[in-house]
Image (cartoon, rainbow, N blue to C red):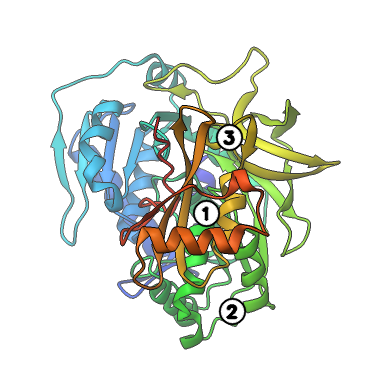
Amino acid sequence: MIAFFLEQMQQAPEHEAVVSDAVRISNEELLVKIDLFRSWIKQEAIHQGAVVSFNGDYSADAIALFFALADNKNIIVPLSNDSAAHFDEFRDIAQTEFDIELGNGNPKLLCRERKHSHPLYESLRETSDPGLVLFSSGSTGKSKGIVQNLRKLMQKFTTPRKSLRMLIFLQLDHIGGVNSLLFALANNGTVVVANDRSPASVCQAIERYRAQVLPTSPTFLNLLLLSRAYENYDLSSLALVTYGTEPMQQSTLEKLVSTFPDIEFQQTYGLSEVGILRSKSRDSASLWVRIGGNEFDVKVVDNTLRIRAESSMLGYLNAPSPFDDEGYMDTGDLVEQDGEWLKILGRKSEIINVGGSKVFPAEVESVLLEMPEIEDVVIYGEAHPITGKVVVAKIKPTEPLSSREMKKRIREYCVERLSSYKIPVKVLVTAETTYNERYKKMRREIK
């Protein structure tokens, strides 16, 4: 599979592969970097099948090292600098044998005095396939180490698609980031890298490098609207924004469509455990989406989405397998169904049961985000001796307000917009962000 990507680049050597303020590099130059890393890997005696981590966000070096390690049939553990606080935890879960640090100079290599023989790793070594280890976001609990057969992940990109200039938002430690990179390079597209993931930097990169596609999260898109950074840049090249990783709030989507009438908004769906499914939104302003593809089987059981995929993970390093006897994974996502169309309501584990009535956090968040006093909000449940759970709102305000005043305004605003049991009974005001380094809301249910 590596050969396919290298051949694609060889066919258009002068095509721009990666572009950012730090570097502009052609396919030919990227191939040279891959060869240099191949030689370095051989020189440092990183053996085939070894578990190797590297930290470094999107750059020509990080991309070249990724492909060189895959070519060496290594089990790759990419780590984003955003998650630096978790590096030791992730490396311990993955039981890395080599750790590489990418910086402005030569790569630094740390050889670990450990050899790991997890059954999932042994299955990759037996077939001489490269592997990929990703970690769940931990938004509702401890991160799980997810092992993928990288050859199978790459296989689906051999079908020709449109060549696009894609701004990479999700990092290499995220299935969405890996998917975007492989899509771009398989189709002689261009990887556009912003200086950082602030709204201003993303808008600047879109303008400067004429990005056509922005894959991102609903949380970032809400921040973009609040910042109004888009007013200072020419975003006319941007034709498509895809969003996933968490439920989109209807109010946010409607604002986006109104603000950017010439851009198509498309919901995506995927998990590190099964890969990214092909998707199509009913229209830009709709939360109804059709998902699937030739390599995926999708079904709904008890209003919960289940998926079977050719590119499913091999398993978890530190948790039991989530697949049933037929190979389906219960995603834990509750959905509504309208023929072939689905509406993702949210994780079953995040649903708040108030006296027997279900509260979907995204629905409450959508209403609260209409309030001018609220910049961002995350909704979760807290144990209650009578109702079982109550709704809690953690608010980042747009103006200085006490929790008591914010609670009063929320109740006044929601009384005619939400059923009484959905209105937050506890309000916490914070100056901190309500999302993690992957721009995904952090829901911490208090028991």
Towards the viewer: 342 or 161: 342
Residue designated by label 2:
237
Where's residue 10, x and y in %? 50, 58
Amino acid type at mark 3: Val
Where's residue 102, x and y in %? 22, 52
Q: Picture quarter containing residue 328?
A: top right
Q: Residue at x 48, y 71 (%)?
A: 224
- Vertical arrangement, residue 64 with respect to residue 100, above or below: below
Label 1, label 2: how far apart the Cα atoms are? 18 Å
Label 3, label 1: how far apart the Cα atoms are? 39 Å
Q: Picture quarter containing residue 317?
A: top left
Is 109 on the left or on the right of 314, as rendered?
left
Residue designated by label 1:
180
Residue designated by label 3:
354
Where's residue 175, x and y in %? 48, 44
Amino acid type at mark 1: Ser
Amino acid type at mark 2: Ser
Q: Residue at x 35, y 36 (%)?
A: 76
